[in-house]
Image: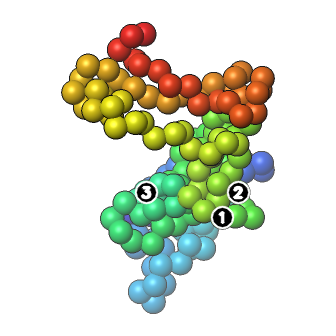
């Protein structure tokens, strides 16, 4: 099955539809334009505002080992970035920036720190549930802070 995202004039994903692959075939080769034309005809929405997306792509990786396509599978509320050819999920925090290589948002100070061996052992044993969560207020007060370590069992 082929999947297409319906986008508005600002690139916001409004809907995702599925088409039979046969609609896209031309001389045995998949052609996105044929899907776009079909969707325009049957949905009264401009063909250039139907963008093909891959159900198997997340953070620029294909879950079955294939070639990732357009960064992420589009969902309602995502945004189409025509320049980078990536579907972006909503920005999680004001300070976060696009990390194009992995088609995901990243904190301005990088990924969360790794748990220590002791924290990981406690989490695996079920005595604690250590996680790092982003605290936008802490970052805004001091740009060296942001990741906060919490034990979810004590909450």
The residue tagged 2 is: 81
Classify mark 1: helix, strand or loop.
loop
Horizontal side of residue 51 vs 128, given as left or right: right
- Point 21% across, 27% down: residue: 125
Q: As rendered, which of 8 and 57 lies closer to the eye?
A: 57
Q: Residues within 10 Å of mark 1 (few under 14, many from 20)?
A: some
Q: Residues within 10 Å of mark 3 (few under 14, many from 20)?
A: some
- Point 42% across, 63% down: residue: 62
The residue tagged 1 is: 85
Return the disc, 3 or 1, that comes first in the chain's sequence.
Answer: 3
User: Are the residues at dot 2 and dot 3 in contact (C-beta closer than 8 Å)?
Assistant: no
The residue tagged 3 is: 55
- Point 47% across, 54% down: residue: 58
Return the disc, 2 or 3, that comes first in the chain's sequence.
Answer: 3
Residue 54 showing in the rendered view: no
User: Are the residues at dot 2 and dot 1 in contact (C-beta closer than 8 Å)?
Assistant: yes
């Amino acid at each position: 099955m082929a999947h297409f995202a319906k986008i508005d004039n600002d690139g916001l994903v409004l809907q995702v539809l599925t088409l039979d692959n046969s609609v896209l075939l031309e001389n045995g080769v998949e052609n996105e334009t044929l899907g776009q034309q079909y969707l325009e005809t049957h949905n009264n929405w401009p063909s250039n505002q139907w963008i093909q997306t891959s159900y198997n792509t997340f953070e620029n990786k294909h879950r079955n080992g294939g070639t990732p396509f357009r960064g992420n599978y589009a969902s309602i509320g995502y945004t189409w970035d025509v320049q980078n050819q990536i579907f972006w999920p909503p920005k999680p925090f004001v300070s976060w920036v696009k990390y194009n290589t992995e088609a995901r948002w990243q904190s301005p100070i990088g990924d969360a720190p790794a748990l220590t061996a002791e924290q990981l052992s406690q989490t695996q044993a079920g005595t604690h549930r250590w996680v790092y969560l982003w605290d936008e207020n802490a970052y805004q007060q001091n740009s060296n802070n942001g990741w906060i370590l919490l034990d979810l069992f004590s909450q």
